Image (cartoon, helix red, strand yellow):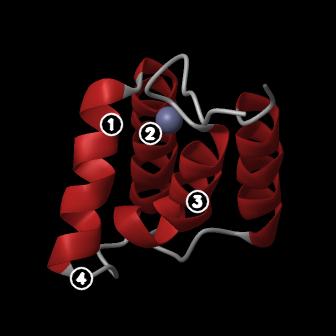
Amino acid sequence: MSEHTPHNHPDFRCRELFARMSEYLDNELDGSLCREIEGHLNECQACKVCLSTLKRTVALCREAGAAPIPETLSRRLRELIATLAKP
Ligand SMILES: [Zn+2]
């Protein structure tokens, strides 16, 4: 059996990235991890679209209340992420 990636987009990488996306948005990740995420975003349209949606959502949220992301929103983000991460 050969290990053969049909496409430069292994699912686990997207999942891992999604798991860190909220930290990334809050600038809580260190530089190398940020670069890794940005590198992936350049190759993966699905993640790119997702991140821009999240960024906008977070920005709106901050403008509205200057508060941390409410629990309902982070739950919705997780659901969105889970949907997008499906094969
Ligand atoms: Zn991806």
Residues at marks 4 and 1, CA–CA distance in whole angstroms? 17 Å
Residues at marks 4 and 2, CA–CA distance in whole angstroms? 18 Å
- Label 2 near ligand 1 (CB < 8 Å): no
The three-letter code of the residue at mark 1 reads Leu
Residue at (63%, 33%) from the top-left corner?
A: 2
Residue at (24%, 48%) from the top-left corner?
A: 38
Is 58 on the left-hand or right-hand side of 83? left
Is 44 on the left-hand or right-hand side of 84? left
Quadrant where the image shows the C terminus: top right
The three-letter code of the residue at mark 2 reads Leu
Quadrant where the image shows the N terminus: top right
In front of the other: 75 or 37: 37
Q: Which residue is mark 1?
A: 41
Residues at marks 4 and 3, CA–CA distance in whole angstroms? 15 Å
Kindly check if marks 4 and 3 are in contact, taking CB atoms under 8 A apart as contact: no
Can the viewer see residue 56 in this picture?
Answer: yes
| Label 4 residue SS | loop
| Label 1 residue SS | helix
Q: Which residue is mark 4?
A: 30
- Reading the chain from its start, which is encountered first: label 4 or label 2? 4
Q: Which residue is mark 3?
A: 16
The three-letter code of the residue at mark 3 reads Glu
| Label 3 residue SS | helix
How packed mark 2 is, by other alpha carbons closer than 10 Å (few <14, some 14-19, many 20 or more), is: many
